[in-house]
Image (tube, rainbow, N blue to C red):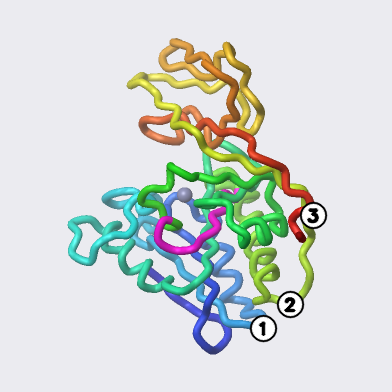
Amino acid sequence: MRVAQIGSGTPEIAVVAGVHGDEPCGVRAVERLLDERPTVERPVKLIVANERALERQVRFVDEDLNRAFPGDPDAATHEAQLAHRLVDELEGCFTFSMHSTQSHADPFAIVNSVSETANELVPQLPVSAMVETSNFAEGRLFSEIDTIEVECGLQGSETAAQNADRLTRAFLTAVGVLPGDTVHRDLPVYRLTDVIRKAQADTYEVFVDNFTEVEAGDPFAAADGNEQVAEEAFYPVLMSSNGYRDVFGYAAEKVSVLTPSTAAD
Ligand SMILES: [Zn+2]
């Protein structure tokens, strides 16, 4: 784990990259900040988390770090030990953690629960949606540390790296680390309601687009040609044919749309 800081004093803001070793976009954004060392109005901690997995260009070494929190210093796995050290490092910091996906090119934010802070900050980020994980946060970083996660785009793409850079700067501006103003956007809010499992198969297909409503009765995915049909309407989130080993992704409901006037209330 690499830990750095810009500005003096004890940081209450942190930016985390590389929780997953096959998602290099955030690492580029952090390295760029460290190269440029912008003048800051309050200190910020910068962390590259899973360096061992990043070196190997794999999601994780032993287990998924973002399912390993709170971790344990005496754990048998690299990631469970790392989770413990990361929580220690981030204690007291409001944290911004960057990811990328195989499912959706447009950036969106993921929060544990929709809080006043999230309602205030996330509409100032260049994201197209905010997703509340609610019951599906077990083992994730934000189950321990107050965190906004962002999905920056498609894994390994240049666009994701550029998005990570824009997202980080918008976040740091919104929390007053960097000077300047942000733009408030309309922000649809979704809440995860279900995991969409997939059966063991050789080929997987997904027929639907993330954040676009699937009607009851519509086929939305298939495993070896066996179609899965929606029992009720839902919004797919983080759905992809091969992104995860045993799930296609998640079903969500649309909760609300935050508009600049409601976000400012
Ligand atoms: Zn990730």
Q: Earlier in the sequence, mark 1 or mark 3?
A: 1
User: The C terminus is located in which quarter?
Assistant: bottom right
Give how far apart the Cα atoms at labels 1 and 3 are. Answer: 25 Å
Q: Identify the secondary structure beneath mark 3.
A: helix
**How crowded is the residue under tag 1: few (<14 C-alpha within 10 Å), some, or many (20+)?**
some
Give how far apart the Cα atoms at labels 2 and 3 are. Answer: 21 Å
Residue name at image x 58 percent, y 26 percent: 234
Residue type, label 2? Pro
Q: Identify the secondary structure beneath mark 1.
A: loop
Residue type, label 3? Pro
Looking at the rendering, the stretch of residues picked out in magenta corresponds to: 143-152
Q: Circle 3 is placed at which residue position?
A: 260
- Mark 2 and mark 1 in contact (Cβ < 8 Å)? yes
Mark nearer the viewer, 1 or 3: 3
- Mark 3 and mark 2 in contact (Cβ < 8 Å)? no
> What x and y, as percent, mark residue 116?
62, 60
Q: Circle 2 is placed at which residue position?
A: 179
Q: Is mark 3 within 8 Å of ligand 1?
A: no
Residue name at image x 26 percent, y 50 percent: 62
**How crowded is the residue under tag 3: few (<14 C-alpha within 10 Å), some, or many (20+)?**
some
Q: Circle 1 is placed at which residue position?
A: 41
Out of 178 and 122, give the one closest to the viewer: 122
Residue name at image x 39 percent, y 73 percent: 89
Mark nearer the viewer, 2 or 3: 3
